[in-house]
Each structure stands twice: as C-alpha cells, then as structure tokens.
C-alpha cells in the first residue's frame, strides 16, 4: 500500500521556485492498478518518483506499507528500492549491453550466484516473451521489446510495487496495447501493485481500476475509474474523457438545432452498467408523450462495465421538460442539460 | 647511413624513441590512475550528481583549472623542488615523467568528466531506483556506458602527452620530440627535423588509430 499524505514539492530553478506538487494526497491499495493522468508539467513524474524517493517531498509524508520512507537510513532505502520496480518512458537500459546483462543487472547488484542469475533471467524473459533475444544487444531492439526488457529488469527482484513513468508514451498504439496487456498480467499473476502515470486516457481506460487527475501540481479528483470517468467534475477531466469518447456535437448539426424554433431541450445522458431492459427513450415517448431524437450515442467498456453516452433532444414545454428530466434522474441515469451557442457547445461549468 | 643524412646515430634515434614510449606509457598509466578517479569525483559531486558535494567539487574544479592554466614549460620548472623529493633528481627522463603526470592528470580529469557527463541521466536514475550503492552505480552503469567515449578521451590525452614530451627535453627528458627541437630546429639540421616530425606523425597516427579502433569495437556492440 502506498500513501501519499499532504505532499508538496518545490524545486529551485533558474527562473525561480517551481511548485511541482501542492498538498497532494492519495492512497494506492494493494492490488490496484492506479493511474495518474495529467498534461505535461502537471507534476506526475515528480509524484511517482516520491514513492522510491528519487524525489524527496518538501513537505508531507510518503508511506509504503505503513513505513514513512522519508525517515529511512540509506541502506534501508536501498532495501526498499529493491522491492519497488520502475520502468521509464525512455526505457533507460544499458545501451552497451545485451538483453541478458540488462535484466541481470539488479541481480548482480544483489550478488546473486551466477547460476541462479541465469535461471532467473530466463524465467523473466519467458514471462515477457523475449526469450529469443536473450543475447541480442538492446540497441538492436524495437521500442516495445526495449520496454519488455525494462519490465523484466524491474521484476527481477520480485518487487511488490511497480512504478511506470509514461511507460507506453514512446510506443505506437499496437505496441502500447501489448505492453498494457503485460502490465495487467503482472498485476494479476504476480500480485504486483502498479502505480502508473500517463497523459493518455485510453491507458487509464484499458487497465486502471483507480485514477487521479492532476493539473498544476494538484490532484483535482480521484476515485475508481468508473466514478471519475462517469461523472467528471473538472473541465480537464472532461477533456481527457473526450479523448476516448468524443461526444461533442458537430457544428453543422448544432446550427440546425439552434435554428429550430420550437420548445426543446438537449440532454447528455451517461449510463453505467447494463441498460438493456431500461427503454428510457421509449418511455419518454410512450408515457410522457414527448417526441425525442437521438443526436449522438456511443458505448464503451470500462473495467468490464458498459459505459454509454447519449445526447438526446426532447421536444415539449418547459414544465414538461422538467418532468422528463426528473424522470431520467430518478431512473439512475446521470443527466446534464446542454446549451448550444453558435455551433460551439457550452457546458455549464 | 642514418648518421650521414641526419647527423645522429641510429642508436641515438632508437634511444630517443624508447624514451618517448617510456614517458608516454608511464605518463598515461600514472595520469589515468589519478585523472580517472578525479574525473569520476567531478562527475558525481557536481550539482545533481549521485554524491553531490559542493566543497569537494569546488576544490577539485579550481585546482584543476589552476594547474591547467600554467603552461607546461613553466610547470616543468616550477615543480622541480617537488620532483627532487619524489624521484631524487631534477633532470632526466624520470624527472620529466613527474612533470608530465602533473600536466596530464588535470587534462585527463576534464576529458573523463566530459565523457561521463555524456551518459544518459536516465540510466543513472534506473540504477538508483534498483537500489544500487554509489560505487555500484559507477562501476556497473556509469563506466560501462561511457567506455567508448572514455577510450577516445584517453586517446586525445595521450596525443596531448606526446606533444608535452617534446618539451620535456628541456630538463633532459630525451625522446623524439627533443631530437627535433635540440638537434633539428636549434642546429638548423633540416633533414633530422623532418625525419623526427615524421616519426611523431607516425606515433600520433598509431595512437589515434588504435583509440578509434578500440572505441569503435566497444561501441559497435551498442
Ligand atoms: N529537477 C527539477 N528541477 C526543477 N524543476 C523541476 C524538476 N523536476 C520537475 N520540475 C518541474 O516541476 C513541474 C512538474 O514536472 P513533472 O513532474 O516532470 O511533470 P509531468 O511528469 O507531469 O510532465 C514542471 O514544471 C517541471 O518543470
Ligand atoms: Mg513526466
């Protein structure tokens, strides 16, 4: 378990003091795949580097399995680090060495006997599916293969925590997916708690069960991916959600809607879980006798839960529309009223 | 035959070449033994280094700058009393060697420092994240990653050293460079001067060729 409690981090730089983290608190439970998302410069790397103390907090505490790691002696800190693996965006491998030598490095540092090193490295390369490259020099590998070496190296000492600093950001989409699959396997089969940071929403959607959204050194919101994703509170969170579900209304359609003179209202509906058997729109027309039309609809799956977004235009008097809105809310669907202006969609932020 | 053309015996030529090799070899060995650790110290104690230490860094940094700013020929004379303490004499090849070590050590320290600074910070970070001790970081990560570049640095240092050995003749250090200066240049013996310069060119080519070859071999594994 990782607990970051009220941590602030300031850097002195040439252009003055930089507040990389401001009063950040978060808890990663054992077994989590915890994702931190934010734009570049948000403080994500600084945050993840607190956990193995590559970065020391200016204020606040960092607990790993209940121990305040900022108080550890140097030898104890090194012991802790052997229990925490880390992988990087730029892989950070020894360019002049082979795959074997890179994966063996942490074991050599631990003075593991050579025979055991051989065995362990083969085991690890089997796990990351890179056995055939054992004697290849790492500079001859593709990006995805390099990251597999990085992962094997990080797992060599059987850590219980894995930190990933933008581990897939230098990879193409297909390779990214295969590395994400591997991370999932590590979490599931080896019971490794994973803390990863990224600027890509689909990484969060694909493998994380929890997420924190960061901006300007602060954690804006955090919770299960479904909570945060399903009901984003901040503009930045919404913009990240938008990168996987683009539910904006095309300009030409928005203009047409605006030209329509009759009374109507546009709702954005977010459903979670199984909505089959909940014929919401049908009931609006059948029970409330109000016409409606779907402007947009999409479905995706998150953590095995179906997640859908629908934008619906409903026609009728203001009073009747209020009734319908109440009905939708009562059926457990998250609803938001959209106000369209000149082709651009305005949210009531 | 050589005597006829160059005005010195072939024996003299061989002795001179031997003296040059002697000064180069020991100068390089002793200079490396001192210069490489100093270069490492400079790298790890600087701001952001794995053992950041302002006092140590500043001390080494300024000492190196001061020694390096003294022209070799002045250094040669200035350290004579020290030379006498170390090797018991102020003249001769061994005495010259002392001054050469003084000359080459700070030079090599700087070359080593710049080679080590080329190493990607990320690799050092990965090593620290693995729980490596500072000595392990240096031995298993910093030096192997910089090896190709270190070899080229030592090559540059060796050629610099060769230039300095010519001047070591001033205190009787001997060597090929000394032949060129005292017999060739000062006695207007142009054929000898040309011949010794050719020998020096061959030396430089051999050293640089060897350095390039070794460095390339190390790097082609990358
Ligand atoms: N060692 C450092 N010295 C000075 N400023 C730093 C240092 N590391 C990070 N920063 C600053 O802290 C802020 C957060 O950086 P970082 O954690 O790397 O963000 P992210 O990983 O989200 O892109 C940035 O403004 C960055 O410039
Ligand atoms: Mg970063």
Image (spheres, coloured by chain):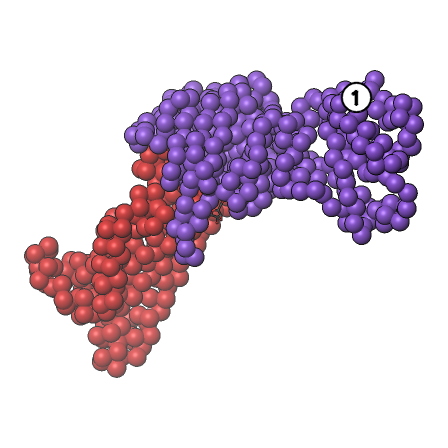
Chain colours: A purple, B red
Residue at 18% across, 66% down:
B75
The residue lying at 88 percent from left, 41 percent from top is: A263
From this view, report whether residue B197 is shown above or below residue A82. below
Q: Name the residue under label 1.
A: A275
Give the number of callouts: 1
Please tell me which residue lies in front, B80 or B4.
Answer: B80
Q: Which residue is drawn at 46% across and 41% down?
A: A22
Vertical arrangement, residue B115 with respect to residue A60, above or below: below
| B45 to B189, vertically: above or below | above
Q: Which of A40/B94 is in front?
A: A40
Chain to which mark 1 belongs: A
Residue B153 pos. (x, y %): 37, 55
Q: In the image as oriented, which residue stretches furthest toward the bottom?
A: B188
The picture quadrant where one finds residue B85 is: bottom left
Work out whether residue A91 can be spotted.
no
Image quadrant where residue A321 sits: top right
Q: Where is residue B106 in the image (x, y as percent from the top left)?
A: 26, 57
Q: In this image, B91 relative to A239: left or right? A: left
Q: In this view, does A230 lie to the left or right of B82?
A: right
Q: Does the residue labelled 1 lie within 8 Å of ligand 1?
A: no
Q: Who's the residue at 83% across and 33% down the image?
A: A319
Q: In which quarter of the image is residue A39?
A: top right
From the top left corner, tell me how far across and down residue A200 is, in percent. 63, 39
Element under disc 1 = loop
Apparent side of residue A235 relative to residue A114 in the rendered image (left or right)? right
């Amino acid at each position: 378990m990782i607990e970051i409690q009220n941590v602030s981090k300031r850097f002195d730089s040439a252009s003055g003091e930089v507040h990389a983290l401001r009063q950040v608190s978060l808890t990663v439970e054992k077994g989590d795949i915890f994702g931190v998302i934010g734009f570049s410069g948000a403080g994500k790397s600084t945050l993840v580097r607190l956990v193995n103390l590559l970065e020391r907090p200016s204020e606040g505490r960092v607990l790993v399995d209940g121990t305040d790691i900022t108080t550890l002696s140097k030898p104890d800190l090194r012991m802790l680090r052997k229990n925490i693996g880390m992988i990087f965006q730029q892989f950070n491998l020894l360019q002049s060495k082979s795959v074997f030598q890179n994966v063996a490095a942490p074991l050599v540092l631990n003075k593991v006997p050579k025979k055991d090193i051989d065995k362990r490295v083969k085991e690890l390369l089997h796990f990351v599916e890179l056995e055939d490259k054992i004697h290849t020099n790492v500079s001859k590998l593709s990006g995805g293969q390099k990251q597999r070496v990085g992962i094997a190296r990080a797992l060599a000492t059987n850590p219980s925590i894995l930190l990933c600093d933008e581990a897939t950001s230098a990879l193409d989409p297909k390779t990214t997916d295969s590395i994400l699959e591997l991370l999932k396997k590590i979490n599931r089969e080896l019971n490794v708690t994973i803390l990863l940071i990224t600027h890509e929403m689909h990484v969060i959607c694909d493998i994380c069960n929890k997420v924190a959204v960061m901006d300007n050194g602060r954690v804006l919101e955090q919770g299960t991916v479904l909570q945060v994703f399903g009901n984003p509170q901040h503009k930045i969170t919404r913009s990240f959600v938008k990168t996987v579900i683009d539910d904006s209304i095309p300009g030409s359609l928005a203009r047409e809607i605006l030209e329509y003179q009759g009374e109507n209202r546009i709702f954005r509906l977010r459903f979670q879980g199984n909505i089959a058997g909940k014929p919401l729109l049908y009931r609006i027309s059948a029970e409330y006798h109000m016409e409606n039309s779907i402007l947009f609809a999409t479905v995706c799956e998150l953590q095995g839960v179906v997640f859908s977004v629908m934008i619906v235009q409903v026609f009728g008097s203001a009073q009747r529309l209020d009734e319908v809105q109440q009905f939708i809310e009562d059926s457990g669907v998250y609803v938001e009223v959209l106000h369209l202006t000149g082709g651009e969609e305005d949210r009531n932020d | 035959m050589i005597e006829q053309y160059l005005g010195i015996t072939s024996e003299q030529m061989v002795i001179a070449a031997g003296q040059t090799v002697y000064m180069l070899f020991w100068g390089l060995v002793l200079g490396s033994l001192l210069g490489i650790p100093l270069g490492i110290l400079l790298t790890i104690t600087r701001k952001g280094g794995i053992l950041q230490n302002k006092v140590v860094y500043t001390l080494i940094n300024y000492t190196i700058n001061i020694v390096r700013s003294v022209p070799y020929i002045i250094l040669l004379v200035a350290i004579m009393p020290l030379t006498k303490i170390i090797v018991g004499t102020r003249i001769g090849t061994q005495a010259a060697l002392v001054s050469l070590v003084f000359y080459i050590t700070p030079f090599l320290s700087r070359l080593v420092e710049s080679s080590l600074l080329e190493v990607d910070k990320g690799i050092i970070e990965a090593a620290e994240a693995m729980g490596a001790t500072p000595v392990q970081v240096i031995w298993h990560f910093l030096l192997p990653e910089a090896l190709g570049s270190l070899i080229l640095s030592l090559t540059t240092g060796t050629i610099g050293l060769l230039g300095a050995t010519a001047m070591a003749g001033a205190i009787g250090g001997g060597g090929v460079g000394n032949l060129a200066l005292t017999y060739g240049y000062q006695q207007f013996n142009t054929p000898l001067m040309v011949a010794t310069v050719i020998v020096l060119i061959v030396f430089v080519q051999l050293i640089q060729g060897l350095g390039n070859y070794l460095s390339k071999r190390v790097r082609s594994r990358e």
